[in-house]
Image: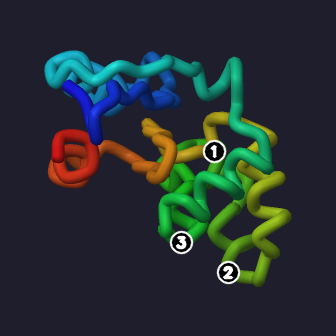
């Protein structure tokens, strides 16, 4: 598998115990996509990385929050965002704890995929 003539290696940011991450990793393996694995809690993305990735993804910042996580609810993050938390504050909050970040993340040179949606992944990684 290669893209535009050269093999692509993506950064795969995951929480290994997460069932969606396991499915996503199996999908990458199944499709022969090379990736560098990164544990989202042990090596949580920095605020700078998150800001860059959010821009590259073209997605709203809120899509980077793990809204179904216990931490998200415990900290009342939705209320903070609704109250007008700045992007800078949101990136700092995300960088403070890997469990707040939506996963898995696939980071390529020109794209970022947030969460595992097979159709999106096929369109981005297999075409």
SS assignment at label 3: loop
Q: Mark 2 highlights which residue?
A: 82
Question: Is the residue 31 above or below the residue 60 in the image?
Answer: above
Tell me the tag on residue 60: 3
- Badge 1 crowding class, 10 Å Cα cut-off, few under 14, some 14 to 19, many 20 or more, is many
Tell me the tag on residue 100: 1
Q: Marks 3 and 1, Cα distance to the nearest angstrom?
A: 16 Å
Q: Nearer the viewer, residue 69 or 36?
A: 36
Residue 86 percent across, percent down from the top left: 81, 75
Residue at position x 77%, y 82% in the image? 84
Q: Nearer the viewer, residue 43 or 77?
A: 43
Left or right: residue 55 versus residue 23 is right
- Badge 3 crowding class, 10 Å Cα cut-off, few under 14, some 14 to 19, many 20 or more, is few
Residue at position x 42%, y 26% in the image? 9
Q: Marks 2 and 3, Cα distance to the nearest angstrom?
A: 14 Å
Please identify the quarter of the rendering in which residue 51 is found: bottom right
First in sequence: mark 2 vs mark 3: 3
Residue 19 in view, yes or no: no
Question: Is the residue 40 above or below the residue 79 in the image?
Answer: above
């Amino acid at each position: 598998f290669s893209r535009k003539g050269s093999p692509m290696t993506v950064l795969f940011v995951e929480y290994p115990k997460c069932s969606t991450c396991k499915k996503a990793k199996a999908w990458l393996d199944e499709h022969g996509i090379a990736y560098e694995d990164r544990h989202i809690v042990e090596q949580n993305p920095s605020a700078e990385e998150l800001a860059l990735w959010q821009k590259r993804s073209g997605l709203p910042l809120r899509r980077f929050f793990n809204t179904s996580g216990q931490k998200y609810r415990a900290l009342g993050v939705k209320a903070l965002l609704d109250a007008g938390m700045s992007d800078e504050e949101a990136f700092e909050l995300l960088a403070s704890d890997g469990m707040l970040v939506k996963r898995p993340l696939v980071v390529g040179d020109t794209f970022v995929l947030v969460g595992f949606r097979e159709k999106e992944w096929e369109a981005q990684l297999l075409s």
